[in-house]
């Protein structure tokens, strides 16, 4: 899994459907985190740090115009915690490569609920996940506003 193209959210969702117990899901999330592309050292700045996470999380966004007023967003992120890196991998599979409009219309927290992850995350991890989603949505909102 560490080679080739990143997994799609549909592939991740399908794989989760085969995992019945939390330990297997936990291991799979950690494995997903190992597949994240390297995060540039120079991007580990206070500006890119996601506040509200118990572990350290950095997130950057890049915007590409697509000619129809809804720029396409790509994200890079990293964390110093294995499980959080896995949550990031799921989040990036959900959001990266989508238009800012699609990002704002997508409820990532519902996805984590559907995957059976939300009820198994500690309150701190849940808050951190919410903070990451809010940061992604803020980048999308800014990109959409700048496109108009």
Image: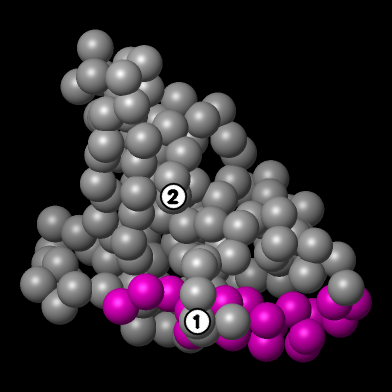
Say whether residue 1 is magenta. Answer: no
Pointer 2 local density, CA inside 10 Å: few below 14, some 14–19, many at least 20: many
Image height check: is 4 above or below 146?
below
Residue depicted at 71% across the width and 62% down the height:
11
Asked which quadrant contains residue 134, the reply is top left
Residue depicted at 77% across the width and 87% down the height:
23
Residue 131, can we see it? no
Q: Is residue 13 left or right of residue 67?
A: right
Front residue of 126 and 112: 112
The circle on residue 20 is: none
Q: What stretch is highlighted in magenta?
A: 19-38
Front residue of 88 and 9: 9
Image height check: is 116 above or below 20?
above
Residue depicted at 86% across the width and 66% down the height:
17
Say whether residue 35 is magenta. Answer: yes
Asked which quadrant contains residue 145, the reply is top left
Lower position in the chain sequence, tag 2 or tag 1: 1
- Where is mark 1, residue-wise? 3
For the rendered model, the colour scheme is one colour
The percent position of residue 142, horizontal first and vertical second, equals: 25, 29
Which secondary structure dominates the residues rendered in magenta?
Answer: helix
Front residue of 6 and 30: 6
The percent position of residue 20, horizontal first and vertical second, equals: 90, 77
The circle on residue 96 is: 2
Q: Is residue 20 left or right of residue 94?
A: right
Residue 111, can we see it? yes
Residue depicted at 20% across the width and 22% down the height:
146
How far is mark 2 from mark 1, CA to CA?
18 Å
């Amino acid at each position: 899994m560490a080679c080739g193209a990143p997994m799609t959210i549909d592939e991740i969702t399908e794989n989760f459907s085969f995992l019945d117990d939390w330990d297997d899901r936990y291991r799979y999330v950690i494995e997903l985190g190992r597949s994240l592309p390297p995060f540039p050292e120079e991007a580990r700045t206070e500006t890119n740090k996601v506040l509200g996470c118990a572990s350290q999380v950095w997130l950057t966004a890049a915007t590409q115009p697509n000619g129809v007023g809804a720029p396409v967003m790509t994200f890079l992120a990293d964390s110093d915690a294995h499980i959080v890196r896995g949550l990031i991998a799921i989040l990036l599979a959900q959001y990266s490569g989508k238009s800012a409009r699609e990002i704002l219309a997508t409820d990532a927290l519902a996805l984590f609920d559907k995957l059976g992850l939300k009820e198994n995350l500690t309150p701190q991890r849940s808050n951190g996940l919410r903070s990451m989603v809010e940061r992604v949505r803020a980048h999308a909102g800014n990109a959409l506003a700048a496109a108009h």
